[in-house]
Image (cartoon, rainbow, N blue to C red):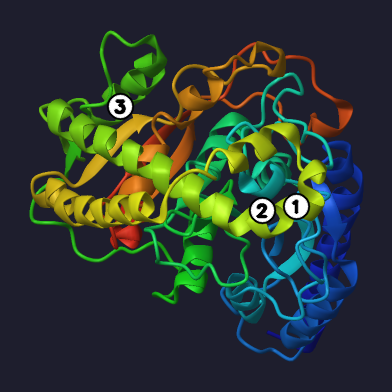
Amino acid sequence: MDEKRELEQAADSMMAFEQTLAAVEGIGRELNAVTSVMSDRAHNLARKSADRVSAGEPARRLEGVPFAVKDVIDVAGVPTTMGSNVSSGPDPSTSAPVVSLFERAGALPVVKTNCQEYSYGILGDESAFGRVINPIDRTLCTGGSSSGSAALVAAGVVPLALGTDTAGSVRVPAACQGVIGFKPTFGKVSVEGVFPLSPSFDTVGLFARDLPLLTAAFAVISGNGSGSIPTGSSPAKAPTVDLSLLNPTDESSAEVRTWVHKHLGDSAIASTTSANFDYLTGLIERGIDYYDIVRRYEAYVLHKQFLDDQGEKYQPGVWAKILSGQNITVAEYQSNVAALEELRAVAESFFDDVDFIITPAIDGDVIAWDELRSDSAAKFMRYSLPFNVLGWPAVTVPIGAVVGGPDTASAGPEPSPTRPESVQIIGPPHCDETLLKFVAGF
């Protein structure tokens, strides 16, 4: 590359970066998705990135890619608010490894994002900063807890964002806002520097509109591969996809069944089976019981240090969830942790005869804020939570047209004629790259 072209490319990169910051301050704040703008840090890294380009150095995996950070993940020198008025300590002096790895790969942290308080809730309805606005349709629920990260990607403000997923908190807001959401295998990505909700289930996840970018980002934070979608040789046989959870009498899975028929019906991409309903639902039912005890106990233990002095500062629903764990005994907790570990070990054999599972992303349509009911959270988590319990990697992917989005977000779109639809695809534990390669085939 000649010197003139290198300078032009560096200038273009800086211009795009400034446009991103302007969108964060504009659309991002209009969507109430922003808690802090990290302009100084991002400017410093952007200049270094531009200097590398000008010097003709090879581009790093995420060179110049702006990204958002859910505000439970530490960035050095920037407040980590957890979406709360509760003070849980001084501003961090070091960044979470996931942030540092992104920066070393050339990515630019531009904004911290609004979220459900302390990640405790799947609807995104309780934050000290108020609710995030869904850029698809401002009347629709955003899902949570990583609602702000999903919104900035959905609105085209940033191409990439970090969130956390304990019961669906990446995949559900991704489905509600029409973007890709990925929860890796439990333990695959470091959660150091991330304020926990329930350490037995917490997972750092990713949002993007572009699967190759998400795949490259996952390679960076997991320390695997080159960051490209794996190609490799073709498998000896087409994979087998389990469709047992696509109940033909359940209207909530109708769109997903249509999508599956379009992509897998009469094709050589994969064979399908629906023969594992009883076994799979048995695993799920056992796991949910363990999840309830373990999550409530761990959340209470994490927060009890703040309750006496700051209890009144919590959002009411979050406060109630935290207190629900106060009477669980250590013995009860430990027995459920042991049972959970045994279940995870036994459940891996499910993939002896199956390669992937396809389910709806949520149970039913994405609902409006004024349609929330007592069972709404359970319906949102119906298909995501089981795979946090089992620890398996899962991706939610939009299907069909997504109405609204970046061209209409700042204007406050009228209610969309259709609501976003997504499919969830699950793979075996520790086979995250294989799952992403399979998803890329659609």
Q: Nearer the viewer, mark 1 or mark 3?
A: 1
The image shows residue 367 at horizontal and vertical percentages of 60, 17
Residue placed under numbered mark 3 in the picture: 260
Circle 3 residues within 10 Å: few <14, some 14–19, many ≥20:
some
Which residue lies at the image location 64% right of the left edge and 77% below the top edge? 100
Give left or right: position of 163 versus 338.
right
Q: Quadrant of residue 128?
A: top right
In the rendered image, the quadrant that contains the C terminus is top left
Using the numbered discs, state the Cα–Cα distance from disc 1 to disc 2 in whole angstroms. 41 Å
Secondary element under disc 1, as helix, strand or loop, is helix
Residue type indicated by callout 1: Asp
**Label 3 SS:** helix
Q: Which quadrant of the rendered structure holds the N terminus?
A: bottom right
Q: Earlier in the sequence, mark 1 or mark 2?
A: 2
Give the numbered dot on residue 299: none
Compared with 388, 424 (above or below) is above
> Is residue 247 at all visible to an observer of this figure?
yes
Which residue sits at x=55%, y=20%? 376
* Residue at x 76%, y 74% (from the top left corner): 92
Amino acid type, mark 2: Pro
Residue at disc 2, secondary structure: loop
Q: Relative to 256, does residue 441 appear above or below in the rendering?
A: below
Q: Position of residue 99 (x, y in %)?
A: 64, 71
Q: What amino acid does circle 3 point to? A: Val
Instruction: Quote the CA–CA distance across marks 2 and 3.
Output: 27 Å
The residue that mark 1 highlights is 308
Q: Residue beneath label 2, please?
A: 159
| Position in image of residue 422 (x %, y %) | 47, 30
Question: Is residue 316 or residue 74 the one in the foreground?
Answer: 316
Q: Please say if the residues under marks 2 and 3 sit with CB atoms less than 8 Å apart.
A: no
Q: Mark 1 or mark 3: which comes first in sequence?
A: 3
